[in-house]
Image (cartoon, coloured by chain):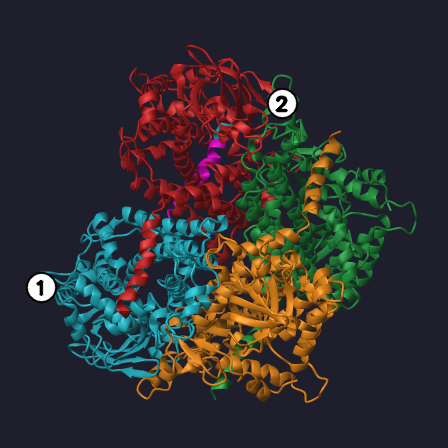
Chain colours: A orange, B green, C red, D cyan
Amino acid sequence: VKSADQYLQSIRDGRHVYLRGSRIRDVTVGEAFGPAVRRVARGYERYFRDEPEAWHPMYEVPSSPDMLRERLHLVEDNDVTTATSAAVLTLVTACSRSEVIEDRYGDQIRAYMDWVRREDLRVAELITDAKGDRSLPPSKQDDPDLYVRVVDRTESGIVVRGAKFHVSAAPVVHEFVTMPTKRMKVGEEEYATAFAVPANADGVRIIGSAQSPTEEDARHFPASANLAMPEAMIVFDDVFVPYERVFLDGEVAESALFAHSLGLWERLSGLVDIAHRADVLVGLAQLVAEANGVAGITHIKEKIADIIIYSTMIRAGIEASINAAEELPGGICTPSELYTNALKYYAAANYHIVLRNVQDVAGGSVVTAPTIGDLEHSEIGDYVAKYLRTSDDIDARYRLSLFHLIRDLTADAHGGKYMVGYLVGGGGLMAQQLVTRKHFDMERAKRAAILEGELAARSNS
Amino acid sequence: VKSADQYLQSIRDGRHVYLRGSRIRDVTVGEAFGPAVRRVARGYERYFRDEPEAWHPMYEVPSSPDMLRERLHLVEDNDVTTATSAAVLTLVTACSRSEVIEDRYGDQIRAYMDWVRREDLRVAELITDAKGDRSLPPSKQDDPDLYVRVVDRTESGIVVRGAKFHVSAAPVVHEFVTMPTKRMKVGEEEYATAFAVPANADGVRIIGSAQSPTEEDARHFPASANLAMPEAMIVFDDVFVPYERVFLDGEVAESALFAHSLGLWERLSGLVDIAHRADVLVGLAQLVAEANGVAGITHIKEKIADIIIYSTMIRAGIEASINAAEELPGGICTPSELYTNALKYYAAANYHIVLRNVQDVAGGSVVTAPTIGDLEHSEIGDYVAKYLRTSDDIDARYRLSLFHLIRDLTADAHGGKYMVGYLVGGGGLMAQQLVTRKHFDMERAKRAAILEGELAARSNS
Amino acid sequence: VKSADQYLQSIRDGRHVYLRGSRIRDVTVGEAFGPAVRRVARGYERYFRDEPEAWHPMYEVPSSPDMLRERLHLVEDNDVTTATSAAVLTLVTACSRSEVIEDRYGDQIRAYMDWVRREDLRVAELITDAKGDRSLPPSKQDDPDLYVRVVDRTESGIVVRGAKFHVSAAPVVHEFVTMPTKRMKVGEEEYATAFAVPANADGVRIIGSAQSPTEEDARHFPASANLAMPEAMIVFDDVFVPYERVFLDGEVAESALFAHSLGLWERLSGLVDIAHRADVLVGLAQLVAEANGVAGITHIKEKIADIIIYSTMIRAGIEASINAAEELPGGICTPSELYTNALKYYAAANYHIVLRNVQDVAGGSVVTAPTIGDLEHSEIGDYVAKYLRTSDDIDARYRLSLFHLIRDLTADAHGGKYMVGYLVGGGGLMAQQLVTRKHFDMERAKRAAILEGELAARSNS
Amino acid sequence: VKSADQYLQSIRDGRHVYLRGSRIRDVTVGEAFGPAVRRVARGYERYFRDEPEAWHPMYEVPSSPDMLRERLHLVEDNDVTTATSAAVLTLVTACSRSEVIEDRYGDQIRAYMDWVRREDLRVAELITDAKGDRSLPPSKQDDPDLYVRVVDRTESGIVVRGAKFHVSAAPVVHEFVTMPTKRMKVGEEEYATAFAVPANADGVRIIGSAQSPTEEDARHFPASANLAMPEAMIVFDDVFVPYERVFLDGEVAESALFAHSLGLWERLSGLVDIAHRADVLVGLAQLVAEANGVAGITHIKEKIADIIIYSTMIRAGIEASINAAEELPGGICTPSELYTNALKYYAAANYHIVLRNVQDVAGGSVVTAPTIGDLEHSEIGDYVAKYLRTSDDIDARYRLSLFHLIRDLTADAHGGKYMVGYLVGGGGLMAQQLVTRKHFDMERAKRAAILEGELAARSNS
């Protein structure tokens, strides 16, 4: 496995990365991607062992509910582990769910996974296409490239063109695992393509976006200054992919399989992330209530209890999802589609209300508090210290840090990214409803309904 | 174990039961308690075995999550099984949670349980007192009997006076297990009393309420005509209780223990009941949408999906609650307080919206549909058949039965009882919040919050 | 104008009314329609003046916001006034909104209105058809009568067949004003028919449904025993309608006009009714909280405040709707479509939560309280008096009446009817959204959005 | 009245302003307060007339509902107009509501208002104190300065110390009108102080916070780059206030009057602002749906309809509030406390869900879209143009601007500030409930409830 330094070295590989109108020649330098790079590096550090056969536990394929459960602790600590894990498991799940995929691509998928694991690489998932006019299918767009497609092929591989949006962590990972965003139809074979390419492949462009702080003094961004993870739009400008990295090539009937598999793994890890965030928000609400001297007031306690219930329901749903995990042929154990999707809906639909509760508990200082710079300023520092203080136990620096953290997580760019991400990640509210409905046992429910009536019928006859 | 006939015989025991201003001398006769009696009798039938050592599985004390899970199927089929099960497990849980109870009352509690099991009795739980002016404690009420209390004692037992409210199934069970509604304070020893008495004990009066249909033709009450379970207010007019049936006698410090234990078991079985009801409502919404020809309309599908998600979240929460079950000294395994209470809040807070969704899907015929009597009437039957019909597949009788069932379950007396019961059973919304908060690991949440800040601090130092 | 007695006499007119499988030969006898008949009679009493030129103010056509506002107080007191008023104003509105209607039917509409006013008649509105399979249009149903249609015509009139559902107050009014439920298409001319017929016309059958109490002692139904208003399904079995009572006859392009006009008036009066109900529920919640001794508890006060806010928002919406009333050609002043429909959505979407709040405040006695009959019973009356009492100020009879009233209004048949009626009356939630969207000034909103961007553009150029 | 240039000149007055750890010597220079200064200047420009007797209409005291209604258009365009207007009207309202204030301070209040109007000044309202430990009253804090208080007095005036938080627009206005945050008690006379001081008075420090963009290229902040208004914490370090600028001086019984009056005016103008914002969000949701090609999809239309209903209910509430305006002695007409407060609760409680709807409609590009800088970049501009484009009608620049604007308003610092501000401005949710309850006619509601029961009683006797 790699050390943190080896990781840093490995992503100085000539990749073409852009942010806010500028080329970023080395993503490990500066604060644009600094929080992300440091965060990924910490992940390497944690698992580094200088042994040839060592590997990061996230590459392990879970074959039981218990293995699934353990895995959640991994993904709790790192968005990139999450993305890599989801990408790898998606490929395995696709093999397990389809004989066609297994027969035609199973071997190279396993070879790819072995290589990624051995090299200890980090992987991004590329799924959402540019889509142009969404009321039209890929083949009816006025520009045929609005969905990623095969534009040419040689004896040794395919040439792809198009763009993928919302690619988490892209600027700081090694590999891009790419798949169709939805089921393609007969006649859309060129769009039924899945493959992997390195981030620095010829023709790949990484156009990033980031919520890392842009202010000189980042201390009033306590979370994002160290945790902000960029997103990116990835452009494939006629990128060559050798056949050993192609995992779907024209099989339209199988083209939704990757997206569905990825959706499941993405929603699960999204939920683990939300569960963690919910705990942080419970803790912050309680801490700020105590710091303000309002922790004993009934309506404050109710609002905190609401967040507690949200957090608890999410953990309950994850637990149920794992408990009802399904073992697929090939041995991979996947979380329950039903519980995962219903829970994702619940979590996404209610997150904004959680933010409202936190903000109502914390009050207006969330958005009006001075900075640590103000606290340290020779002319006004004493005023800030005097008036932001609660008591001898609770000084201004501590209270400021609470307000800053709440703002950073709920009412600023970083929090805004998560607010949107939790909502639309793995599809918006409608998508969660659709998938839940698909996996719900409607026949059982109908029978239960009819049984209530039949009993009555019987008793009256 | 008893046969259904033996059960019917056993409750013709001279008990004093009243309903809507009249004494009901034999609860097994007539329709006032008819649905309840038949329902309980069906439960006896199902488990009847003519063997001396046989016993109903509900008396088994669960010692593992799997035993707990199995048990849920029992309680799914019968409110009385639920009540009996909760009463019995509450006594065991109280022993396991308190050495005082175990030491002083453990033996007679076990003797009582053995007897109940051997005799195959059904038990009601008596918890809520009359309470009078709720802003005052028991000992400050102008009438000291507004909470059940010991008014006298002899060498062989105590004499109790007071009343208990909201006692489910009371008119049709054998035994009343009674406990304090809340923690009593020093000086309120007479109120710290728990005991069991038979339903026909001297001085016991059972003042029932029921949602069984009162109309001549009960066919437009497809659920309540066969499933309605009465509630009752129980009066103790100086009832004698022998010491071997006394389970708490003045220990104010332990007085809340029974209520807390009962709360847990009651909420769990309440949730199992709501889960079943939610499935019935999903099924009904889908069936009526199909019968009306609107099952393909987007907003109808969304409303049904909302109920599906509700149902699924409740099953997830139950699953999590059992999975995280705690094994107590003495071997009983109790569901997670945290998950059970958070889930009870979720279920209670959202049930009214579930009803709204069902009603919005079904439309106004829920409350305006003709009766089966109209359908069979010589002058108008043909009109009802003609105009309530959808197509050759869906005739008027079927559609009427759907509308009647939905009304019975969501917009009439029986549904109204459950609407209120799910909300306030085991305490109202506030009580669920309180107990959830108490069992949530707030220290973990605070640490998680602080960690987000520390990371930042570290990276800036 | 009629006296109450004249009214009673006038509806003993040989009409064919059925309820729960029986013919009701005289609707003024017995309790099936008793509450409704008494309620309507009280309305006659209130406005009776023995003068030839007198008329009930509800027949006045409002020509200003102030007249509209006054009118609301009328409709507050009586469902039948509401229905009559809506029927009459719908005809006038239709004339004002369409030159075709005005030209072809204006005179007979006014003649009909004059007659109704002179005779002081009460009118029901017939709108919703049987509809059969709702995924098919009228002309594609396998039975062509599933929407009301003209099946024959003579020199002097038309012959109609079909059925109308959800007709409020039908058994106790004089006239049925009938109109198409939606816009008909070319080829569906036979379904584009609007007309008026008396309740006792040949071939008319009134198949009622009612939530009036069926128990012997109606005292635990304090609201429905005196206020319950029936609904009915009306069958037209080849009913002859003379041309002077025909208000639309084949003009498909105008066929939705009546339904849209009626929708507006119906929603407005529905809202006035909900506003009244909301006040009653605020009052009940407060009274029961006081009676239970919990009025000072924070979470109780919050729940009551929630209902207060609901009530206040509804009154605000009505006020805005009248203030922004539109004056149509012909002089009728109609409430704002935009405000009325948005408010109807708000009121319908949140009513179930209002019920939840009331029930959570009141507690389980809402569904388990003894009856007045129990209180008066020689054996148990003293127990009920003792244990349902709060203090010297608040005795059992009063508390019972509060619990009964809350159950009657929120958790029993009468309350169930209103719960469904408020939700789907004037169309379900989706319909309110649709109409609101149609009347919202989207162009203004788009301009407001663009302006935010333009400002920025300007400042950067 | 002043010209825009005169305004700019007037605030270069030596005031002590700080932001993010630095002193800002001239607030008219640079982008920290640039958007605010330009915005205020545009307001001056709009109303500038070079006539001696001219004055800005916001200083007019409204004496009728129509004047109130007109006024709303003023406050729609400018936060500073809003603040100034609220501050001025609060002083007048306080005089009208209290004879004590009128008698002792009426003359100097009017003199102050005349001067402000003549000089065309902009005014901030200072209300929220530092508060320290909120579980303690002002006089029990360990630092007595945690609420603003009089620490000394001379013959000609008072000397005040303390700090006020959340002062909108403070860095760019002329005057600070200061008042107690709540009712003070006997013994807290030093805290019962209201007064006005200029922003550049000796001992005044303005510690600002701002959501204006800090990035080099502000074009992806289309709203905040031109509209962001700063907040500030104001410190009074022994500031002298001459008696002619003191409006309350020890009258504890009157001390809450200013806060209550301000609350009313602040909530009203807050609501006008939210109404405008709601329209912008409806427009943006519709525009982005159209730009993405999803405007015809049912669930998208529903989500937009939800925002429409929110926007419409807010306008309805404002309309009702003005319609029911109360005329006070002295001639000022104030909006209805009942409607204003109920509406503020509705608006605040539901705003987060509005954001959720907008974000769900718009999708993930809200937080991942490239910048205009990316679009103009020589290496990647063509890619951005190609892949962010929808069709020939909808190019990348337009779509980017929509995504940026939505992010700026809903998921970034500027939007975050409003999310918190709408929620807690004028007090959090609890405060709105309290004030609504206080102004609701509970006796009317109780009577309505009792009447339902009496009718029944009558009919049964």
Q: Position of residue A296 (x, y in %)?
A: 49, 68
- Along the viewing direction, whichever of A199 and C275 lies nearer the viewer: A199
Give the structural element (helix, strand or loop) at label 2: loop
Q: Is residue B441 left or right of residue A299?
A: right
Q: Quadrant of residue B193?
A: bottom right
Q: Quadrant of the N terminus of chain D?
A: bottom left
Amino acid at dot 1: Asp
Q: Is residue D325 left or right of residue D398?
A: left
Which residue does the image show at 34% across and 53% down from the upper left?
A: C445
Q: Are marks 1 and 2 on the same chain?
A: no
Which residue does the image show at 23% across and 67% down from the upper left?
A: D40
Q: Nearer the viewer, mark 1 or mark 2?
A: 1
Query: Which disc, if any, is residue D50?
Result: 1
Q: Quadrant of residue A267?
A: bottom right
- Along the viewing direction, whichever of C447 and D135 lies nearer the viewer: C447
Magenta segment includes C433: no
Give the structural element (helix, strand or loop) at label 1: loop
Q: Quadrant of residue C117?
A: top left
Q: Is residue C238 above or below residue A99?
A: above
Q: Is residue D132 left or right of residue D23?
A: right
Which residue is disc 2 drawn over?
Answer: C21
